[in-house]
Amino acid sequence: MGKTVYNMKTTEITIVLHEFQSIGELPENDQLLLTEARRITALAYAPYSGFHVGAAVLLDNGLIITGNNQENSAYPSGLCAERVALFYANANYPESGVKSIAVSAAKNGVLVNDSVKPCGACRQALAETEVRFETPIRIILDGQNSIMVLQGVESLLPLSFSKKAL
Ligand code: THU
């Protein structure tokens, strides 16, 4: 019995994430954006999950657009906070790139312990916006224990699908 030898190549992909212990440690622009995300979290419509999420998007024209999760009794008809904010921004300011997004989340009105992680569909939507405007999006993820900051969607969604493949 012969042994098959595969000519395999292994690549390690590194993601970079910065962690801060409190909002006060963040750079001033991030603090402002995260404060907006926290404010809009409280206004989420999440009667089914009780998980309230808020997102604030900073555009390259300086505007901040906010959104929160909008649930529905027909569950899949609802939408995450990130996409509510991002799609509103892209719909109303199609010429403006997105510089950064801050996301916060609360259960029973209390900020979640671990930093909130965007779902796969929101990561894909963020990837689209990054490719569309050719600008990396800074991502700020809120939590009691740590606030994570990523420099671009590549760190959230490596090996992503994009129009480059079409
Ligand atoms: N949700 C968001 O809005 N963003 C996330 O990053 C994670 C999940 C919403 C969807 C749903 O309304 C609720 O949180 C529970 O999954």
Image: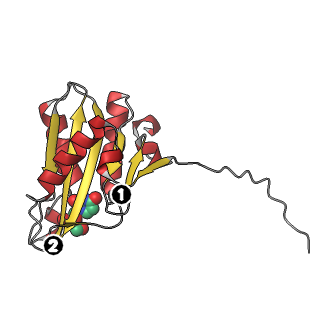
Q: Quadrant of residue 133?
A: top left
Q: Secondary structure at mark 2?
A: loop
Going 91% across and 75% down the picture, which residue do you hit?
A: 1
Nearer to me, 127 or 65: 65
Q: Quadrant of residue 45?
A: bottom left
* Spatial separation of the CA atoms under disc 1 and disc 2: 24 Å
Give the image location of residue 103, x and y in percent. Answer: 26, 52
Give the image location of residue 109, x and y in percent. Answer: 15, 68
Give the image location of residue 46, x and y in percent. Answer: 12, 67
Instruction: Give the quarter of the figure containing the C terminus.
Output: top left
As drawn, is 155 to the left or to the right of 144?
A: right
Badge 1 vs badge 2, beta-carbon distance below 8 Å: no
Q: Secondary structure at mark 1?
A: helix
Residue situated furthest right in the rendering: 1
Three-letter residue code for mark 1 = Gly
Give the image location of residue 104, x and y in percent. Answer: 24, 56
Q: Which residue is mark 2?
A: 108
As drawn, is 114 to the left or to the right of 44?
A: right
Q: Where is 35 relative to 42, above or below?
A: above
Three-letter residue code for mark 2 = Asn
- Dot label at residue 81: none
Going 35% across and 60% down the picture, which residue do you hit?
A: 115
Within 10 Å of the Cα at label 2, are there few (<14), some (14-19), or many (20+) other Cα atoms? few
Q: Nearer the viewer, mark 1 or mark 2?
A: 2
Going 59% across and 49% down the picture, which residue do you hit?
A: 13
Within 10 Å of the Cα at label 1, are there few (<14), some (14-19), or many (20+) other Cα atoms? few
Q: Which residue is mark 1?
A: 120
Nearer to me, 111 or 90: 111
Q: Quadrant of residue 2?
A: bottom right
Nearer to me, 93 or 111: 111
